[in-house]
Amino acid sequence: MALYKILCTVPSTIIPRSPFDDHNLNKVASFEFWEEEYKIPKSLLIEKLRGADALLTDSALPIDKEVIYSAKDSLKIIADVGVGYDNIDIETATKHGIPVCNNPHILQDNVAELNFALMLTLAKNIFRADQHVRSGNWIEGQTSHNQIDHTDSLLGSDMKDSNLLIVGLGETGVEVCRRAVGFRMDISYYSRTRKKDLERELGITWVSKLEEGIRRADFISINVPLTDETYHMFGSDQFKVMKSNAILVNTARGEIIDTESLYEALVENEIAGAGVDAINPEPIPIDHPLLTLKNFIATPHIGGHSVSSRRKLAESILSTLELHLTQGKLTNCVNM
């Protein structure tokens, strides 16, 4: 007989189900999975949490005050399969003695790689160049000079010796930095905490004020969590002081950028381009004006995911649940 009841609202497209079958926790717990393609409705979530010992969720599902309060008598832990936990009402969970745990140290390499993929796609006009070929505009006999329309140039930007500003030097920011070293970029970083050991190791420079870094950056990589301080960290004021050739990449949280201001900055050519894996709203509506722009690209919040990382995510978060439920130990707890 199962000792613990665990509700999992994370789709199998994010974490596969096979690790659940193989894990020791399966011997003492029963799992209920939400397998629909749409998010579980709030009323149904509250219903299914009755008597549950643990909730395994992800950043796409809001876990607000009402949800937590409804399950406070039985819920022993809320575990987020990813790194970010801004979808969870931490204050309410803490008030009712419910630990919230996340799942760090797994996704940073994948996120950093997508960060660079977006950066390179924009810098080298890869998407537009591909469309140029598919549209039949690569004509035999034309040189590379005269087949490129000067009004819609496919010529790219140099990465080497360009200035990269990394906003947030946590695990992902550090991995972006390591890759930028390989491209021989001039790297600076903006962070609340100066990290002199990494400055010496990687040859990077700290800027104490965000505007200082923005003014000189050719590329900007956003890697901060969503907090009250970082909400709309990039808006019209920031875009107006950025270089006109600057490329902005966000693989963190959509709300860090003011989406309306981003659109205006791209239309007015205040910046050269933007690539995002996270945006507000998410998902972005198909008729959103940003999707009409050639200097904007987006991916559907896939930064952390690969075939191998999905299994690692599942194994890691299951171990977190097992340690707390069976031994009372907390790992990667963010509120206690």
Image (cartoon, rainbow, N blue to C red):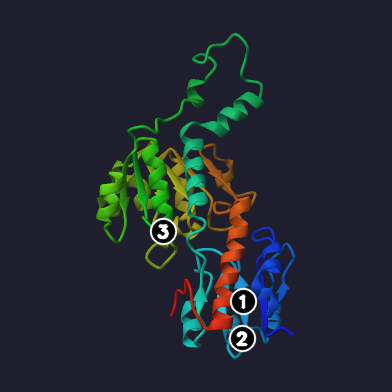
Q: Does the rendering let one see residue 298?
A: yes
- The residue carrying pointer 1 sits among few (fewer than 14), some (14 to 19) or many (20 or more) residues within 10 Å by Cα, namely many
At mark 2, the secondary structure is helix
Q: Residue at x 52, y 50 (%)?
A: 110
* CA gap, disc 1 and disc 2: 10 Å
Q: Are marks 1 and 2 in contact (CB under 8 Å)?
A: yes
Q: Amino acid at mark 1?
A: Leu
* CA gap, disc 2 and disc 3: 31 Å
For this view, does 323 lie left or right of residue 236?
Answer: right
Closest to the camera, between mark 1 and mark 2, is: 1
Q: Which residue is mark 1?
A: 55
Q: Amino acid at mark 2?
A: Ala
Q: Quadrant of residue 33?
A: bottom right
Closest to the camera, between mark 1 and mark 3, is: 1
| Badge number at residue 224 | 3
**Is the C terminus in the top left, top right, bottom left or bottom right quadrant?**
bottom left
Q: Residue at x 58, y 62 (%)?
A: 313
Q: Which residue is mark 2?
A: 71
At mark 3, the secondary structure is loop
For this view, does 45 lie left or right of residue 201?
Answer: right
